[in-house]
Amino acid sequence: MPEPLLSVQNLSFQYPSYPNLPSEPLFEELNLDIRHRERCLILGRPESGKTTLARLLTGLVPRYSGGACSGKILLDGRAAAERQPCERIEEIGLAFQNPEEQLVRSRCDSEVAFGLEALNLPRSSMLERVGKSLSQAGLSAYSRRSPGTLSGGEKKKLLLACLMALKPAVWVMDETLEELDIGTKKEVLELLRAQEQTCLVFSSKWHRLFADAFTSCCLLTGGRMLCYQGRTGGPAFRSWLRKHEFLTPRRRTSAPQGKRSRPDGDPLLRVRGLIFHYPGADGFYLNVDELCFSAGETIALIGANGSGKSTLAKLLCGLLTAGSGEISIRRNGGWKAANPELLNRFCGYMFQNPDYQIFLPEVREELAYGLKQTMERGGDIEGRVEEAIRLFRLPGPQAPPSLMSYGARKRLQAAVYYLLERPFLILDEGDSGISAADFADIVEKLSAPRRTLLIITHDLELAALLADRIYTLRDGGIVPVESAAGAARLEALVEGAD
Amino acid sequence: MVSGFFRSGNSALHRIDPRAKLFVLLAFLVVFFLPLPLPRLIACFCAAALLGGLCLGLRDLLLPLRLIFPLLLLVMILTPPFHRQGVVLLAPWGFPLYTSAGLETALRLVLRFSGISLVFFLYMRSTEPEQILLSLRWFGLSYSLALVLSLALTYIPWLTRLYGNVRDAHNLRLAGVEQEIRSLGFIKRTRAKIPAMTSVMIQAVKGIPVLAMALETRGIGRKNVRSSFYELKSGRAFLTDLLASSLLIAGLALMVVLFP
């Protein structure tokens, strides 16, 4: 048996505690061996410690986060803690979950060359490596463009190009395949297959595309690493994931599939002849002829990266104004054309990033803030806040929101909108960074007979599971998709849109 | 945190060497700080505006002025009452509030402030942050300091975008209250912005260790010598650019001396 290239031995780690937010051990005696040229998929539910493990492997944690760490991480037989992370960039490289946090230069070619400059490579060698990496990542045409102007998927591919140019022995990719449309996911998987380096890909979701794309698969759960022996993707593998509570599908309703659609629900919001394009942005436009949402239904909006899903959501809640067309709200038996102010009051929009709304030092204050502004005097604010804390499993009334885990911050964001009771609620990629089961749980709690939910997601299985109706954006227009189509059919439809 | 003021292009300002441009920038800064008569100051501002307008277009010319417009307005309103010499132009209840000297001082401040903002903007709009960094290093600045400056420049627009998103998120959460806020006075309106500002601050502070991690994964902190992907012009090309910038500086000096 050859020696492992990367070996994690009895690793234990615990973040520091904060007042009203005690921490618990994240890993206890965790072990993992990765061999040369292994492509390993590490699955783990949100908050299982994937990002922390990725950063521990690269030496960024506990260096920048604090916390108690014990055990060993050996890279090619040498203890990782011996040297600073910047001295090991040729040995191990990390692609962040959020590419925007890692891209710092003003041009794509310069971004790829940034790490090479640190190695003091001659310019001719840098030019060769940069050109080759950008070409492999399919970004040659963007070499002089600012990374900020790329789509989410392109940014992730740019980070891969950075790794390709730097050629570290081990690539660690933190949720690199999340929030990508299927076409881009396939491209990235092909890129990984073509490399000879050892890869560790962390993911909070299992996608059918992953089957056979990796040479090994592990599950990070309960602070330990479980390795699956056998072929991934088959029924035995899925039942193994279910056994360890990674896959916990929850049907939104026990009603038969045919009854899930509710065309008889009262109409709530209508879009007609909506045309929108960003000033100065050639090529992108949105053209919605007719779209009607009924009270109490859940609609999923799927589509490729950059197809305009978030733009449509922002138009619906009045953050953007269309050049022409009308959005109307059903009032007193008739349709009332809604201006942006009315849409602001009518629709809630849960931003992808929950931190945009967090600003108070305690959970109860954060929840009560909106109620104090909107609830009539004498209303039971405390009671409603307690109910939301219990329902959304928040750490406690005095917990500091900005220090809570990402999943808890997402639940807090959902709790805020639960209390605000908006008739129309948009969840923009609300499932990113949290498990499908947790997201399904949030959707279930936000569902109400008179509330319409619009879910924007890249997870087609989740869309098929949760939504009464599914739409996809294609060539600027919105196309209905049969909800009973199933994930495979949806996949084909979205691929057609790419 | 990736996009700054820079926009790629092929104008004369884009093509000229950043070190040569830096000399022109310094010349303009000196001129704007000199105690010049008002017509000469106006002429210098017009020269900078003409240069920017011809090379980058009217939209880019107006952008920095639009950004600082509220500040310019405050200067125009608040400066004159502190300079009450000269011909009285406005004297409510016999109190000389606006005089010719007061207005001249205010105009001078506005021109200086606008001129400085404009030339800095033109420099950053037409020069890639990496080129700025490289030219600062050519002038002897350490790599770490030059990197800090470059990151600071890219952070400003990032914070502006972040504030926009956070403000939208807060407005939607308190929809309806937003309209009431608009009708409030200045102090109450400012207080109403505290939630969004706090969220931005939390995000910015939380971003510091993440940025440090991002830089470290790209090799920042290594002790060895760094090479550079970018190259500054050398030899004849650099001399030509230096000559062009010297001509511009000479023209500016002549205007300062000869303009009535």
Image (cartoon, coloured by chain):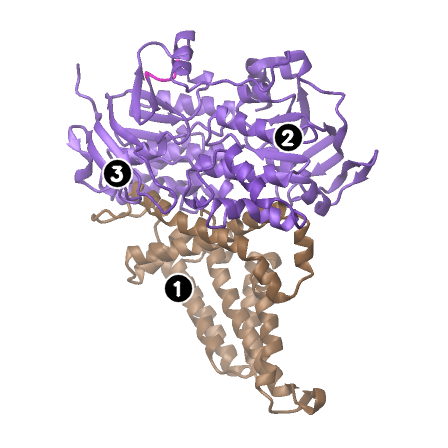
Residue nearer the viewer, B256 or B3: B3
**Amino acid beneath label 2:** Leu
Residue depth check, mark 3 versus mark 1: number of the one nearer the observer: 3
Distance of label 2 from label 3 (alpha carbons): 42 Å
**First of labels 2, 3 by sequence position:** 3
Residue depth check, mark 2 versus mark 3: number of the one nearer the observer: 2
What chain does mark 2 sit on?
A: A
Distance of label 3 from label 1 (alpha carbons): 46 Å
Percent position of residue B43, x then y: 57, 75
Residue position marked by numbered label 1 in the rendering: B242
Span shown in magenta:
A212-216
Disc 2 on helix, strand or loop? strand
Left or right of B199? Residue B88 is: right
Q: Is residue B17 above or below residue A55?
A: below
Residue position marked by numbered label 2 in the rendering: A453
> Pointer 3 and pointer 1: residues touching (CB < 8 Å)?
no
**Amino acid beneath label 3:** Gly
Which picture quadrant has residue B25? bottom left
Label disc, if present, on residue A59 of the rendered structure:
3
Left or right of A416? Residue B175 is: right
Crowdedness of circle 3 by 10 Å Cα count: few (<14), some, many (20+)? many
Seen from this angle, which residue lies furthest top? A235
The chain letter of the purple chain reads A
- The colour of chain B is brown
